[in-house]
Image (cartoon, helix red, strand yellow):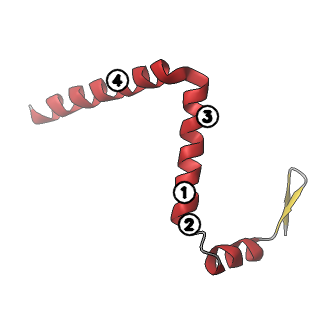
Amino acid sequence: MHQVLGVRVDHLWVKRFLLTSSFSESKAMGYLISFLLGIFVATVGVSGAASVLDKAVKQTQVYMKESVK
């Protein structure tokens, strides 16, 4: 068992829970991604998130144009 921040985690129990329950790892990953995106939008706002995505699209377009040359 490991103790992290005062919380004891039994890895075998966690693995057994994931294997025997209907809660799958893909659902867990979906919840984690949703949570992180929610935190991101909550901190920068919807317009801030749109701005970040717009910059990423522009950078991808520049990269694609340069790689085609």
Give me the C-alpha separation between circle 3 and circle 4. Answer: 19 Å
Mark 2 — residue? 25
Q: Secondary structure at mark 3?
A: helix
Q: Quadrant of residue 7?
A: bottom right
- Which mark is on residue 54? 4
Q: Earlier in the sequence, mark 2 or mark 4?
A: 2
Which tag, 4 or 1, sits closer to the chain's start?
A: 1
- Describe the element under mark 4 as helix, strand or loop: helix
Point out the image quarter for the N terminus: bottom right
- Distance from disc 2 to disc 4, alpha carbons, whole Å, reads 31 Å
x and y percent of residue 37 in the render?
A: 53, 38
Q: Position of residue 10 (x, y in %)?
A: 81, 70
15 relative to 35 in the view: left or right = right
Q: Earlier in the sequence, mark 3 or mark 1?
A: 1
Question: How far, Cα to Cα, is label 2 from label 3?
Answer: 21 Å
What secondary structure is found at the residue carrying circle 1?
Answer: helix
Q: Quadrant of the C terminus?
A: top left
Q: Earlier in the sequence, mark 3 or mark 4?
A: 3
User: In the displayed structure, would residue 32 be above or below residue 65?
Assistant: below
Q: Amino acid at mark 4?
A: Asp
The residue that label 1 is drawn on is 29
In the rendered view, does 35 fall on the left or right side of 59? right
Label 4 and label 1: CA atoms lie apart by 25 Å
Q: Position of residue 51 (x, y in %)?
A: 41, 20
Q: Which mark is residue 39?
A: 3
User: Measuring 65% from the left and 81% from the top, which residue is drawn there?
Assistant: 20
Residue drawn at (61%, 34%) of the image: 39
Residue contact at pointers 1 and 2, CB within 8 angstroms: yes
Do the CB atoms of the residues marked 4 and 1 lie less than 8 Å apart? no
Q: Which three-letter amino acid code belongs to the residue tagged 1?
A: Met
Mark 2 touches mark 3? (CB < 8 Å)? no
Q: Residue at x 49, y 23 (%)?
A: 46
